[in-house]
Image: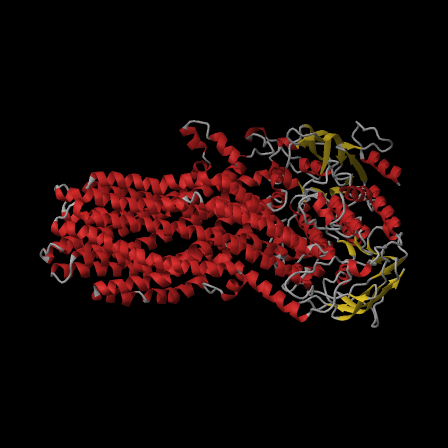
Amino acid sequence: MSKGASLTARGGPVTRLRRDPLVRLLPHLRPVAGRLLLGSLAGAGALGCGVGLLATSAWLISRAAQHPPVLFLMVAIVAVRAFGLFRGVLRYVDRLVSHDAALRALGELRALVLERLEPLAPAGLEQFRRGDLLARFTAHVDALQEQLLRGVGPALSASIVGLGSVALVGVLLPAAGVVLLMLLLLAGVAAPLAGARLGRAGGERVAALRRQVDADAVDLLEGAAELRAFGGEVQRLDGLSAVEEQLQHAATRFRTSPAVADIVPLFASAAAVLASLVLGIPAVRDGSLGPTCLAVVVLTPLAAFEAIAGLPAAWQALGRSRALAAEIVEVLDAPSPVREPAEGSQAELPAGPLGVRVSHAVLRYGDGPDVLRDVSLHVPAGSRVAVIGPSGSGKSSLLAALLRFRDLSSGSVLLESAGGTAADIATLPSQQVRQSVSGVTADAHVFAATVRQNLLLGKPSATDDEIDAVARKVRLLEWIRSLPQGWETPLGTGGATVSGGQRSRLALARALLADPQVLVLDEPTAHLDPATEDEVMADLLAATRGRTVLLVTHRPTGLSKLDAVVELEAGRVRAPDGDTPNDDAPTVAGAVAVLAAAG
Amino acid sequence: MKPVDAAVVRRAPALRGYLVHLGGLAVVSAVLIVAQASLLAAAIAPVVVSDAGLGQQSHVLLALAGVLAARVLIGWLGARAGVRASVKVRAELRSVLLAGALRRGPAWLANEKPGELAVAATSGLDALDGYVTRYLPQLVLATVLPVVLLARVAVADLTAATILAVTLPLIPVFMVLIGYSAQAKMQSQWVLLGRLSGHFLDIVEGLPTLRVFGRAKAQVEAVRRVTDRYRRETLATLRIAFLSALVLELLATLSVALVAVSIGLRLVQGHLDLATALLVLLLAPEIYLPLRAVGMAFHASADGLESATRAVSVAADADNVAAITGAGEPATMATTATAAGKPAEPPAVSLHHVQFTYPGRTVPALDDVSLTISPGEMLALTGRSGAGKSTLFSVLLGFVRPDVGDVEVGGHSVPGGDSVSDGDSVSRERPATAWVPQQPRLPGRTVAEVLRLGDPRAGDAQLRDALADVGADFVASLDDEVGSDGTRFSTGQRRRLALARALLHVRAGARLLLLDEPSEGLDPAAEAGVAELLEHLRGTATVLLVTHSTALARLADRRVELSPAGARPTAGPRAVVQA
């Protein structure tokens, strides 16, 4: 991400601003921009009341010392009380409006991200496959609203009030106004920037050590069983302490020597007070500053520095918002892995039961090697064909192409009716393809919802009888009835535990309920122990009789009830007798020969 | 949550020194603030009242410059102390948490969700930074400053001091009164927000599934709707929660305004001089400032404090456990290897009527299991998942202590569960059992570090031999990084590394080898390699093997089936049918 930032920094200021991730995200946040601004103004009002309270009191007291009639002071007295009252009220408004804006932004961002991720799934989401990257990404989407809340409003209101104070002092004593402006810029802008720059070098070392400590701590906790079994606990604890010590040294050195951001504001506010005294006292003598205004000129800077005290934190939050926004923008920019047909040129889906004909399919990801190299196969309507092969042989890629999660690099996939009419899936909207071709994907997800909701995903209009029937078919009904709340039992995160077998059966039931014309099943028995695997497979075979089925599996056994078995190897269909690739599409008869040869 | 937890201070000695330091700084700060206000008043008043010039005021200005410089210095000292204390306190608490967790043992950890504990040990404790560097200084200031400043105001002007003294105590009272109920509500809103984030992640993770069934688009609106409902509920809470801040703000600023007007009016009547009035005006807001700041800083540090409390409670529990079960040591290298350094003999293993139920479960994981294994025997344990095979290993490894029954390895009884050793540290002895878990973890940064867990004294050549013996040809160099918990390797590769680690442990003298599905995820060729390796180890070590692979099970001298607890047809010892 930092690389991207430094690259964009080379353009002109306008292009730079336009490419800024936060700026690019702004149009999507337009519905909340007005509220964000309103909150900032209320915040500025609250801070301004603080400055106004001190400035007016200073004038009031100075004027009072000249013993004027009390009537002359009435306006100031009312103003002081009003400032005291409105400061709290405006702060209240600021907080409420800003939080409202931030939470609205959260909703907008979530919807936006989901909208953009949707056409990418699952092919475009592969960058998130590893570990908890997806969880981190969604957490970052959620974190952005908080950083916006802490950044935009405070930065805006502190800037407004800082400039307002300069104007007030400047009207009374221009020289003091100029000095105050300089010192405020020094404390509120230059010092945080310099602090961040100075801190970067040492900060990287500290951050690296901190990551090391975190990684070691996690390693220690997750590997605790092994460490105990092999007796390596003490050694690892000692090792961690050593790293902690290094971190301690690095952190102390790095954050105390250039503690610019902490010290400069203190110094600047002291300098501002002294400067306004040095400038103000002669000005009172030569008459250019009224004596009652000296206290105003001297004390206003004190209040002004208090008002901008939040700036460094606001800049930091804005910096963090930018980093988070960059991450989101990157996803928004990802190209769609599938080209949808233009409005006018969409083909018609043939009517009746459908079969699938794959001809000379070639598929590669980006610049990588071909994962499918000239695969041809035919699944006639109503027949069941298994695709087997070791992992990496291209089975899942074939399914991704069938479901139109991926476009073929060359070759075609046709949906054929029994009557012989056919349509190339590349000429159909991908959503329509998936209405006809769907089933169990490799990553079939159990949602954090009730059993019923999880199942109804396949067919929202299904009746109770229908879901009962389908659950019975995959032998899930008994388990569901044994659950504490039956069909209404929550599953997934925070819900009832689902074993591997139940998960597979659930995914299968969902697919059967959806009742697509072509049912694809990607490793429906993965992660099961052999006994359960056999059970689920038997149930699956019984439940899909008479349908068009394409079953992808890594285990070559127990498939004798199918009409054909096709073996993939390194992206090619393996010939029934011998190792040379077969250019002819293996028909059902040809594929049965595979079985015969294998048997 | 207490602002300063005595238990946390006890475990983190750096915190105590820091608090003392802060106390000193606060007293000096109070004196400097008073001095600054007095000098400012002395600098302004004569100019306004008697038209004094810069020359007459120069000594006051110089003194003021000195005081301001001292305040800058104090600020710098405070910041530096904060950074030091923050890093140190976090290191202390992290080590307390980790050592405590290790002493509680793997079984306890598995129950506690290591992921959550890891968050507490890392980012959770990092959140303490705000507590140490911002909250604590404000807390100490809030106890020192108001008293000192109020005393100074009282000396200058009793009326103003009375106004301040009456309103000041109201601030903590209101903080508590309004704060508590709002706090509880806010807490539940945060919990809700967390759940909502989980919901969002759930949908993003399930996008492929949603797309397959054409339901993804509908979820966009659903997410917007759910978030919006949450927003409305949260705002309803916030409207009340922020009221407390409003009241506090009103109290503080209105009091200052009242003081300003009151001294202004008395100035007009000539009851007060300008210098005193200015002094009071400058000190009044400073009296409220730390009290309000402390409230704001507390919210930012609540997370860190929670992790600190967690760390301390884990450690305290570990202390109790260590105190109760100090007896018994696992068989270690020292007890099995002979003094002359001759290779040790493989031990006999026996279990007598062992029963174990995991805490919180009703069905025992091991129900009256008896089993005797002769020295050097290779035994295959079979049975469906859930039959207790892995639990049996946990018992033999001493991770859990059987509720009933005895376990002996090589004539020594195996202690259980949480006991490791007495005292504060974890055991330094190396147990004489080698183990390949079903889901191997690979603690360590490099391949060499991972393997040396099996034998810390092994040279590079021995490590390479072990890798070659398990067919780990995918390792290019011993310095290859394994990634966070071995994520750089596939499941099969990790299993082979775990095998190499166990092999090194056997070569270093371990004579009991526990293998939990050692060939799962391996292709037939690699499985044959494992079989060859086992054949080679026959007689060197007593081997217990859990496997679904018939090729490996065939090697065993004896096969024993463990049937799931509760599925036992009749009463009587569930000793396991021999095949």
> Where A450 sits versus B403, above or below?
above
- From the top left corner, tell me how far across and down residue A272 is, in percent: 27, 44
Instruction: Out of A354 and B506, give the one closest to the viewer.
Output: B506
**Does residue B215 appear in this view?**
no
Q: Quarter of the image holding residue A586?
A: top right
**Does residue B180 appear in this view?**
yes
Q: In the image as oriented, which residue stretches furthest toward the left?
A: A69
- From the top left corner, tell me how far across and down residue A158 is, in percent: 33, 45
- From the top left corner, tell me how far across and down residue B129 is, in percent: 48, 53
Instruction: Out of B391 and B561, give the one closest to the viewer.
Output: B391
Instruction: Out of B250 and B161, give the one closest to the viewer.
Output: B161
In which quadrant of the rendered image does the C terminus of chain A lie?
A: top right
Residue at x-position 81% and y-position 39%: A564
- From the top left corner, tell me how far across and down residue A470 is, in percent: 70, 53
Q: Quarter of the image holding residue A555?
A: top right
Instruction: Out of A7 and A36, give the one closest to the viewer.
Output: A7
Residue B503 is left or right of residue A276, and the answer is: right
Residue at x-position 15% and y-position 61%: B272
Tell me the colour scheme of the image: secondary structure
Q: Quarter of the image holding residue A421?
A: top right
Please tell me how many numbered marks the rendered image carries. 0
> Where A194 sits versus B371, above or below?
above
